[in-house]
């Protein structure tokens, strides 16, 4: 069995590489599999001929997508459809990743897998397009939604806060947007348990939310980052973090006010009580 992992230079791709190692796995960066280039995708697939594709490649610049909707849709949407169409013909399984930003954030409770998406940004729309093409293709595998992804790799809120906390004495962070901070390690670990349970053919629900338990706003997340930095004697000059409304921090793309997702389906499938995000986040410091 050969597994292809796309987007290996991204934070999720690098984390999967840590978990999977090198045996029977081909890791593809943009030079090998460029999801904005149809011929590059096909050339990669025909060359590797994988039995399973773990698609970690994505356009993740949320605000830039407002100015580049065609590129975002090409990478997050149409490329997924192309991968899935090839996989259907070759009886190959696809593991694809989506986002909480497919929801509009108006629900007062946690979003379930069956709740109707209504993205409010070009990024969210492009990810929803990928979901729709995945589902309509009839491909084997699963589309995994996750949220507020962070790790020690790449660009993410956690690394941005670490840098700012080392340079500034005071920060202001939004406190009226809620979600579930999720480490790449949590995603990779639980995804691999999910598909390993099913060996070569996953037979569960086609869309699953993969996030820890609990929730937070960005301000609370930042407080926890600072607390852990101080606990582990990391460099920091930050003395105060002030909560602010998102109205005072305008961004090009609309963010959902509430993008908390329920994880009961994942917990049931794995027969696990999923840890709180606070415990998962602590893993970054060990």
Image (cartoon, rainbow, N blue to C red):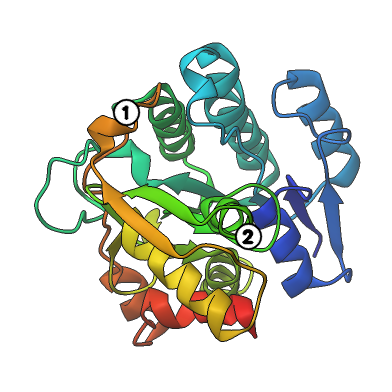
For residue 65, side relative to residue 243 (left or right) = right
Rendering coords of residue 13 (x, y %)? 71, 55
Please tell me which residue lies in front, 195 or 226: 226
* Residue located beneath label 1 in the image: 254
Corner quadrant of residue 256: top left
Mark 2 crowdedness (10 Å alpha carbons): few <14, some 14-19, many ≥20:
some
Mark 1 crowdedness (10 Å alpha carbons): few <14, some 14-19, many ≥20:
some
Residue appearing at x 38%, y 48% in the figure: 172
Residue appearing at x 56%, y 59% in the figure: 165
* Residue located beneath label 2 in the image: 166
Q: Is residue 125 above or below residue 32?
A: above
Q: Is residue 33 above or below residue 174?
A: above
Q: Secondary structure at mark 2?
A: helix
For residue 147, side relative to residue 10 (left or right) = left
Residue appearing at x 78%, y 48% in the figure: 9
Rendering coords of residue 70 (x, y %)? 55, 12
* Residue 209 seen: no
Quadrant including the C terminus: bottom right
Q: Secondary structure at mark 1?
A: loop
Q: Is residue 53 above or below residue 129?
A: below
Please tell me which residue lies in front, 189 or 280: 280
* Residue 265 seen: yes
Rendering coords of residue 261 (x, y %)? 27, 58
How far is disc 2 from disc 1 in space, using C-alphas? 29 Å
Rendering coords of residue 194 (x, y %)? 51, 73
In the displayed image of the protein, which residue is found farthest to the left? Answer: 108
Please tell me which residue lies in front, 85 or 26: 26
Residue appearing at x 22%, y 50% in the figure: 114
Tell me which numbered mark, 2 or 1, is placed earlier along the sequence: 2
Quadrant including the N terminus: bottom right
């Amino acid at each position: 069995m050969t597994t292809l992992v796309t987007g290996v230079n991204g934070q999720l791709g690098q984390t999967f590489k840590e978990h999977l190692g090198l045996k029977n796995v081909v890791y593809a960066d943009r030079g090998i599999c460029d999801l904005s280039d149809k011929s590059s995708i096909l050339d990669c697939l025909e060359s590797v001929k994988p039995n399973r594709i773990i698609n970690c490649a994505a356009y993740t610049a949320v605000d830039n997508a407002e100015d580049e909707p065609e590129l975002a849709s090409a990478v997050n949407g149409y490329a997924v459809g192309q991968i899935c169409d090839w996989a259907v013909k070759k009886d190959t399984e696809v593991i694809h990743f989506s986002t909480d930003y497919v929801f509009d954030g108006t629900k007062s409770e946690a979003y379930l897998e069956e709740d109707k998406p209504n993205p409010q940004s070009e990024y969210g729309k492009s990810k929803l397009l990928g979901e729709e093409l995945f589902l309509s293709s009839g491909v084997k595998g699963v589309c995994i939604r996750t949220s507020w992804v962070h790790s020690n790799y790449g660009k993410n809120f956690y690394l941005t806060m670490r840098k700012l906390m080392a340079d500034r004495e005071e920060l202001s962070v939004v406190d009226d947007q809620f979600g579930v901070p999720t480490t790449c390690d949590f995603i990779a670990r639980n995804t691999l348990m999910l598909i390993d349970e099913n060996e070569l053919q996953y037979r569960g629900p086609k869309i699953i939310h993969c996030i820890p338990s609990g929730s937070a706003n960005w301000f609370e997340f930042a407080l926890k980052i600072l607390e852990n930095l101080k606990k582990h004697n990391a460099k920091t000059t930050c003395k105060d973090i002030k909560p602010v409304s998102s109205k005072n921090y305008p961004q090009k793309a609309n963010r959902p006010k509430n993008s908390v997702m329920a994880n009961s389906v994942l917990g049931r499938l794995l027969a696990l009580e999923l840890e709180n995000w606070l415990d998962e986040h602590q893993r970054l410091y060990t």
